[in-house]
Image: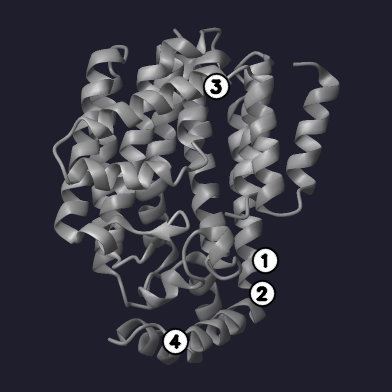
Amino acid sequence: MDQVALQELRGAAKNGQGGGHAATVLQRAIQLASLDGPLAAVREQVEALASTGPWPASEAAEHLLMAGGKAVRPLLTLLSAQAVGGEAEQALGCAAAAELMHDATLLHDDVIDDGQQRRGREAARVIWGNTVSVLSGDLLFVAALQVAAADGPAGVLSELVDTVGQMVEGEVIQFRHRGRWDLDLATYEQIVERKTAALFRWCARAGGRAGGGTAEQVQALGCYGRHVGVAFQLRDDVLDLTATPVVLGKALGADLAEGKLTLPVLLALQKRPELEPQLRRLAESKDRPDLTAIEQLAAAIRATGSLVAARERMDRELQLALAALAPLPPTPAVRALTSVAEVVASREG
């Protein structure tokens, strides 16, 4: 990857105009790191494992997989292997485990949240029901653990088990606080660290281990992954109040309607506590969410300036992620990790 190409990639990531452009930049990063083939191999493995389970759980899993996805977690895993001097092919199993684990959480999340849409399509639970959706997620969870056990280097499986535990803890903490508008920043951070950042951290560490990295390199990659994961979630929080359903793949204000307290809402309530009754009515309503009410409430939250503050926090996390890469040599893969982090934080869907 030459310097001109790198500058072009990083500039495009920072100045992109919408989700389509971010996807183009991401694809450019994949091409520059020669990862088209390895990512295709990961996708084939994931689809094969999902399809071998019993019907109808396998069909529900395939429905989710056919909707596509950005494959950010497998990409970070493969790049992390390259970043320590290894080959992407050494981390194919870890990358497949990362995607299987992520997709499993999506199937479960839609049941917990009564989700109607996922990746621009009807959620699996809408078609097959909650029971099948849960079992389908379980199928992918098991497949992820099996792949990590069979193909991952020493230590990767135990770390993945720990990561799953953190993700479950984060989900439970969030569920416990659903509809409560007195959530403090420390609890919000605890949820984000466990629900989202933990898997990003595992992806980077697993890739580094698979590529033969030193303990210092693996630790640096884990720090990078953690901060990228936090930035990713902060971007999701912002998009919940700004993106269109077509771009985001789910309804505007979905988190608002579910009673989830995101960072922009938390910050908005600090400035305008009188918004709490509106939030409570929306979250406690048994009827289908009123889109007009959601749009008005989202506009009121945006007017407090909380989105600006959330973006500033996201930028700080991104800077910490990039700083974490300092111990690694300035290889093409490390530079690609830099650009991918910027794309993750600037995406529109």
Residue behind mark 1: 308
For the point 47% across and 58% down, which residue is it? Answer: 120
Instruction: Please say if the residues under marks 3 and 4 sit with CB atoms less than 8 Å apart.
Output: no
User: Does the residue at mark 2 contact the one at mark 3 (Cβ under 8 Å)?
Assistant: no
Is 286 in front, or is 172?
Answer: 286
Within the image, what quadrant is residue 304 found in?
bottom right
Of the two numbered discs 3 and 4 on the same chain, state the one appearing first in sequence.
Answer: 3
Q: Is there a contact, CB below 8 Å, between mark 2 and mark 1?
A: yes
The disc, 2 or 3, on the residue closer to the chain's N-terminal end is 3
Q: Nearer the viewer, mark 2 or mark 3?
A: 3
Q: Amino acid at mark 3?
A: Leu
Say the numbered circle drawn on residue 74: none
Rate crowding at label 1 as few (under 14), some (14 to 19) or many (20 or more) other CA atoms within 10 Å: few
Vertical side of 315 occupied by 298: above or below: below
Numbered disc 4: secondary structure = loop
Distance, label 2 to label 4, CA atoms, is 24 Å
Query: Under tag 1, what secondary structure?
Result: helix
Residue under label 2, please give it: 305
On residue 79, which mark appears? 3
Q: Which kind of residue does numbered mark 1 sit on?
A: Val
Quarter containing the N terminus: top right
**Furthest residue in direction right, as rendered:** 4
* Front residue of this view, candidates 239 and 130: 130
